[in-house]
Amino acid sequence: MNSNSFQQRLLGLQDNLLNFAYMLTSNREEAKDLLQDTTLKALDNEEKYIDNINFKGWVFTIMRNIFINNYRRIVRNQTIVDQTEDLYHLNLPQESGFNTPEGSFTVKEITKAINSFTDEYKVPFSMHVAGFKYHEIAEKMELPLGTVKSRIFFARQRLQEMLKDYK
């Protein structure tokens, strides 16, 4: 395929590529940027395209890979590593939402709902929330593992039903 034919095929895909970019980014400006990056990358790698390979699939794969790489770069740049000597930044109080009246009310309601369960559901559910593993709960309560899992499952379902207005 000659260079002119390659460019014409690439231009013919611009609308489809823009739609795909918008689907990935959910933002019109970011979609346009992604389209531009994809077009430039495809043009830079024109010599790598083999004529009998699906052109449209090749270009869409370039776009998807650029999107994934950009996403990973953003996540990596937003990760903060505390390198202070005494981990000062990690020990700063984090906003939990519990200090607000709405947060406190929600915690109180959740606790009240859990306390309304019978012990057969409340105890394994509370232990699970506290961080115990299923097998540890089963050993402590001297119950089969499946029974513990089902009680926690039903307690979770019941809690969701009781607090459905908070979603």
Image (tube, helix red, strand yellow):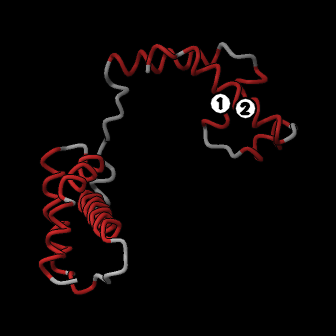
Which dot marks residue 126? 1
Q: Are marks 1 and 2 in contact (CB under 8 Å)?
A: yes
Which amino acid is tagged 2? Pro
Furthest-bottom residue in view?
A: 47
Image x and y of residue 158, in percent:
64, 19
Image quadrant where one finds the N terminus: bottom left
Mark 2: few/some/many CA within 10 Å (<14, 14-19, 20+)? many
Which amino acid is tagged 1? Ser
Q: Is residue 38 left or right of residue 23?
A: left
Quadrant of res 134:
top right
The residue located at (81%, 41%) in the rendering is 138
Which dot marks residue 124? 2
The residue located at (18%, 58%) in the rendering is 14
Q: Is residue 10 above or below residue 19?
A: below
Image x and y of residue 63, in percent:
27, 63
Image x and y of residue 79, in percent:
29, 59
The residue located at (78%, 36%) in the rendering is 148
Image x and y of residue 9, in percent:
20, 68
